Amino acid sequence: MKYKRILLKLSGEALAGDKGYGVDSEVLEHISKEVKAVHEKGVEIGIVIGGGNIHRGVAGATRGMDRTTSDHMGMLATIINALALQDGLERNGVYTRVMSAIEMNEISEPYIRRRAVRHLEKKRVVIFAAGTGNPYFTTDTAAALRGNEIDAQVIFKATKVDGMYDKDPMVHNDAVKFDDLKYIDVLNKGIKVMDSTAISLCMDNSMEIVVFNMFESGNILRAVQGDAIGTRVS
C-alpha cells in the first residue's frame, strides 16, 4: 500500500443513490465492502461524511432560514449518515467509532484528537461526524481539518464522477478531465469539487488530495495502492 493512513471524504448525496434522498441500503453495502477491502490491507482509515442527502445548510439559507440554524441541522444530518455507515461497516465485520464535533454521548464519542489517533492505531475505522462543529464550514473543510489533525497522508474525495473537470461532466459532454492539478489551479479555475477553504487548508499544509469515482468497484483500494485513477491535487 502506498498510503498507511488515509482520510476518506464521502458526500451525503452519494449515500442516497438514485433515490436522491435518505440512505440507499445497496449503496451503503457497496461502500462498506469497499472500505472493508482497504481496511483488511492494514490501512488506517478516517472517514468524514456529509449530510446533503438529508439537509444542506446553504440550501436552507437560500430559502430564508437562518444560516447558523440551517448549518446546525446539516451537522445533525451527518450524525444520521455516520450511524448508518457505522452499522453498515460493523455488519461487514469492521470495528468502528463515531466521533462527533457536537457532543451526543449516548450515540457517539466526542471528538478528541489523541483518542481518534489511538482508535486508528488499534485498526478501528473512525467516522468523524458533525463537520467541524461550526456553522459556515462545509464537510469538505472538516475533511481537510481532520485529515491534517490525524496526520493522514492523503485525502480521498469519493464522488460520482471519475475526477475533476473544467466543467460539470454530468451536464456538458465536452468537459475536459484533469489528471493532475496544483492547488492554486483548482482555486483559479473555480473547480467546485471541494470548496476553496478546504483546498486552501490542504495547500497550506501540503495535504495531497485524490478525487475519484467511488461507484466503480475496487477504486478505493486502487487509490490507496497509488494507481493512477481520478485526479490528483498536490
Image (spheres, rainbow, N blue to C red):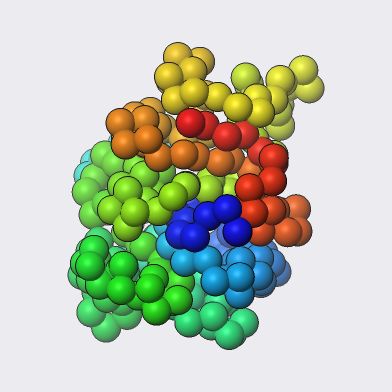
> Looking at the picture, how far across and down is residue 191, in whole percent?
52, 24
Q: Is residue 89 above or below residue 72?
A: below
User: Which residue of the protein is positioned furthest toward the front in this rendering?
Assistant: 2
Would residue 13 be visible to someone looking at this image?
Answer: no
In the image, residue 69 sits, relative to residue 76, either above or below, namely above
In x, y percent, where is residue 228? 69, 40
Seen at 54% across and 80% down, the residue is 94
Given the current orientation, which residue lies at the most extreme right position?
173
Measuring 34% from the left and 54% from the top, which residue is drawn there?
A: 151
Position above or below: 95 against 45: below
Identify the residue at image location x=46%, y=39%. Answer: 208
Q: Residue 177's spot in the image, x, y percent?
A: 69, 25
Q: Residue at x 71, y 32 (%)?
A: 170
Q: Image check: 104 left or right of 124?
A: left
Q: How many marks?
A: 0
Q: Position of residue 128 (x, y in %)?
A: 36, 62
* Left or right of 56, for residue 174: right
Most foreground residue, 140 or 121: 121
Q: Identify which residue, 223 or 24, lies in the foreground.
A: 223
> For the N terminus, which image quadrant?
bottom right
| Residue 29 in view here | yes
The relative height of residue 122 versus residue 171 in the rendered view (above or below) is below
Judged left or right of residue 127, residue 159 is right
Determine the image quadrant of residue 29. bottom right
Q: Residue furthest top?
A: 188
Instruction: Please state which of residues 34 and 171 is positioned toward the viewer in this rendering.
Output: 34
